[in-house]
Amino acid sequence: MNGGGVPRWSATDGDREIRLDDGCGGGSRYPHVWLRNNCPCSSCASAGSGFRKQVIRDFRFSSTPTLFQIVCNDKLYVKWDDSHESTYDLQWLLERNFNEGQERHENQQVKWTAESFSAIFQSFKYEDVIKSDKTLLQWLETLTVYGISMIKSCGLEQDRVKELAGRVAFLKKTQYGETFKVEVNSDATNLAYRSTYLQLHTDLPYYEYTPGVILLHCIIQPESSGGESEVTDGLSVCDRLKEMDEDCYKTLSSVPVRWIDRGHDGGYNFHNVYVSPVIWLVPRRNG
């Protein structure tokens, strides 16, 4: 590293991989086959989208570099044994570090409890999320890490949920439509439309592809008692259950059960059924 604090990168050959060294003890490594498969040149990748043009049946898995070097301290140049040439942006490579424990995935989820909720609960202003990409990113990172947040000053317009969702992606349509009003209806089949207490639950478990985020816009707060919101962190609940009763945890995470929603809404009858364990486990990842 030079006096200005800028890393001085160098590249060395390892066991079927190229290793990058920043000159101050840090570095990363990249397998030959991965580098060749991710060549960003116009012959191998589509400009703009980055989609691979290489056909897998023609790909040489044994490709090895005959020459490689750091160029202008911000790019890695590689010449392959078939004379093909590749140039990689160092920042792009560093974001795809193969060192164990240093792989970069999405922001890691942080579990919370009732005691820590006030410390993790964050709120944002509606106009800021709509108009500022920086605030939008902060909000999305908060949702990813903690799974919950609040948007304030949304106004009373009923399409605000659509506008907010439109800043991110598309709305997923369910049997209740893209959006729906939660109003008391004594004839409704869904308990959400009743005036009785609604216990803690997970929404829409009868879908294989469930919405990633559910937006609730409170427009009117009745003067009568009730209507309080209760939330909990399902990940923390699972951890606690595993500590208290591991056999129960194993059962709930391995035995399939039927999730059913049957009723009538918006002029349609519906009967949804999905089979899965109560607790869905995903592979543990580093990073």
Image (cartoon, rainbow, N blue to C red):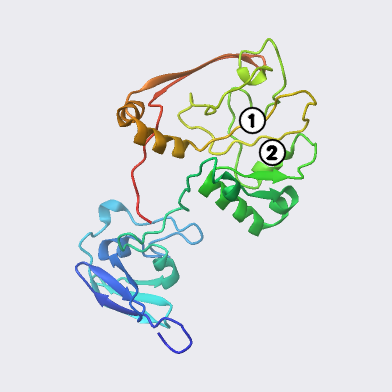
Q: Quadrant of the N terminus?
A: bottom left
- SS at circle 2: helix
**Amino acid under label 2?**
Lys
Instruction: Name the residue at 61% across, 17% down.
Output: 190
- Residue at 34 percent of width and 46 percent of height: 284
* 27 up-or-down from 216: above or below: below
Q: Position of residue 75 (x, y in %)?
A: 41, 76
Image x and y of residue 173, in percent: 59, 29
**On the rendered structure, is 277 left or right of 114?**
left
- Between the C-alphas of marks 1 and 2, the distance is 9 Å
* 103 sits to left or right of 260: left
Q: Nearer the viewer, residue 9 or 32?
A: 9
Q: Position of residue 218 (x, y in %)?
A: 73, 34
Figure check: 282 above or below 19: above
Q: Residues within 10 Å of mark 2 (few under 14, many from 20)?
A: some
On residue 132, which mark appears?
none
